[in-house]
């Protein structure tokens, strides 16, 4: 009997032996009960390893991660001032939209206090309260702004690099799907502060993308 | 606008994740928290199997998600986000292991794998395997986890660890035999 196969057994189990080596290994296995048994055992170990379950950490690590990335931990009171906003509204409708959605969400939260980010060039006092109360769909003011910016982008489409246009359209499509989901969730649970915030942030994201896309330079 | 031509329409879950990635990349920590919660079990399990304690696993998992936050802007979508995050986690944990302050080789020649009693049903076997993996010598452990649990190829592991494929194959076999011996008890 040849000597036992040793680590070649692992290569055999993994199907990594070349043809000649595999034939030789199979010839040895046909005559060696010990190596056959080891092959079975190794297959069992591999099978168990592939079936291991994932489990979350014993404690919630998010607060520590949030602190390290400079984000406020998920708060009971959502403050827009604590969010990193990288754009400022420049269209009057956007101002109305931001104020309306913020106040609507605050009203839904009951006691929650919302503060507009200093970076947002929006004057709260300029928004008539009646506007807020008369809005049936909290996203409606966004829709007007979005339509306006989409019109601008459509008019500029010919000026932009085709790859850039494709990237923007892909991103917009993805965000639109997320907005659809968020709207559906808010319709099911209109007083949920988290869902309203999610819808608002997703709409913000679309506005931001559209605004930046409309400001892109002409393709050279 | 219509979806771009030539690309499949993403599922709702993919779209939601893609939107969260875009939001997080622009600084939205709430979107990033959703990504964290979706992936933390997978990442923590990988890390836990590669380090020496639950506390170390917690620390390294935090490092992974902080690093991922910093690098979200480099995610181009060529691979799935889970794949990108997973690769990043492997790099973080391997670097963590390599750091001189955490060089822990005391079990290299004396694996303490024999001390755990084995059980026989498959659920208990998996639990037992988890415990046994934690007691493997560090070198054999990381290669076993990367190859048999995470599905990396020898060539990739050798590149990540800076060793030869011969070494990874030998260490893998060593790990499997140690685990087999443990499960047979």
Image: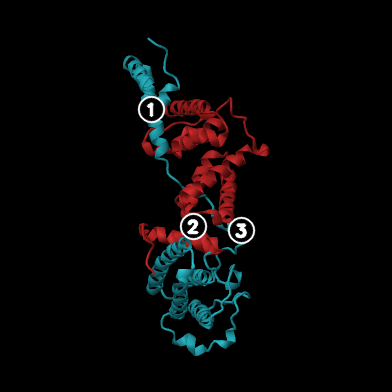
**Which residue position is annotated with label 2?**
B35
**Mark sitting on residue A69:** 3
Q: Secondary structure at mark 3?
A: loop
**Which residue position is annotated with label 1?**
A13
Quadrant the N terminus of chain B occupies: bottom left
The residue shown at (37%, 19%) is A20
Compared to residue A170, the image places residue A110 above or below, namely below
Of the chain colours in the picture, the one used for chain B is red
**Mark sitting on residue A175:** none
Same chain letter for marks 3 and 1: yes
Q: Mark 2 Cα within 10 Å, few/some/many (few <14, many 20+)?
A: many
Specify whether A50 is left or right of B40. Answer: left
Of the chain colours in the picture, the one used for chain A is cyan
Q: CA distance from mark 3 to mark 2?
A: 14 Å
Compared to residue A156, the image places residue B4 above or below, namely above
A78 or A143, which lies in front? A143
Compared to residue A51, the image places residue A45 above or below, namely above
Task: Determine the chain carrying the residue at label 2.
Answer: B
Quadrant the C terminus of chain B occupies: top left
């Amino acid at each position: 009997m040849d000597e036992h196969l040793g680590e070649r057994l692992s290569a055999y189990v993994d199907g990594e032996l070349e043809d000649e080596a595999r034939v030789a290994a199979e010839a040895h296995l046909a005559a060696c009960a010990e190596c056959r048994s080891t092959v079975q055992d190794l297959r069992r170990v591999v099978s168990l390893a592939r079936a291991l379950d994932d489990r979350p950490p014993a404690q919630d690590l998010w607060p520590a991660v949030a602190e390290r990335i400079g984000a406020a931990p998920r708060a009971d009171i959502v403050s827009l001032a604590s969010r990193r906003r990288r754009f400022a509204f420049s269209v009057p409708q956007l101002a109305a939209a931001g104020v309306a959605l913020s106040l609507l969400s605050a009203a839904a939260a009951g006691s929650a206090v919302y503060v507009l980010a200093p970076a947002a060039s929006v004057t709260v006092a300029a928004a008539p309260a009646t506007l807020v109360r008369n809005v049936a769909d909290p996203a409606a003011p966004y829709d007007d702004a979005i339509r306006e910016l989409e019109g601008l982008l459509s008019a500029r489409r010919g000026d932009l690099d085709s790859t850039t246009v494709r990237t923007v359209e892909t991103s917009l499509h993805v965000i639109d799907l997320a907005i659809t989901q968020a709207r559906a969730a808010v319709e099911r649970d209109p007083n949920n502060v988290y869902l309203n915030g999610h819808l608002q942030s997703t709409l913000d994201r679309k506005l931001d993308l559209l605004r930046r896309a409309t400001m892109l330079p002409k393709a050279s | 606008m219509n979806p771009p031509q030539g690309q499949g329409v993403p599922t709702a879950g993919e779209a939601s994740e893609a939107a969260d990635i875009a939001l997080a990349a622009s600084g939205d920590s709430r979107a990033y928290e959703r990504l964290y919660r979706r992936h933390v079990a997978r990442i923590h399990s990988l890390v836990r199997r590669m380090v020496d304690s639950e506390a170390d696993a917690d620390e390294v998992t935090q490092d992974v998600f902080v690093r991922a936050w910093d690098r979200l802007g480099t995610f181009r979508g060529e691979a799935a986000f889970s794949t990108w995050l997973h690769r990043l986690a492997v790099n973080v944990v391997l670097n963590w292991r390599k750091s001189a302050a955490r060089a822990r080789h005391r079990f290299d020649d004396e694996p303490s794998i024999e001390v755990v009693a084995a059980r026989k049903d498959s659920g208990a076997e998996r639990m037992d395997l988890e415990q046994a993996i934690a007691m493997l010598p560090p070198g054999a452990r990381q290669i076993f986890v990367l190859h048999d649990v995470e599905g990396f190829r020898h060539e990739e592991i050798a590149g990540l660890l800076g060793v030869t494929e011969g070494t990874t194959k030998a260490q893998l076999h060593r790990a499997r035999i140690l685990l087999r011996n443990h499960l047979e008890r």
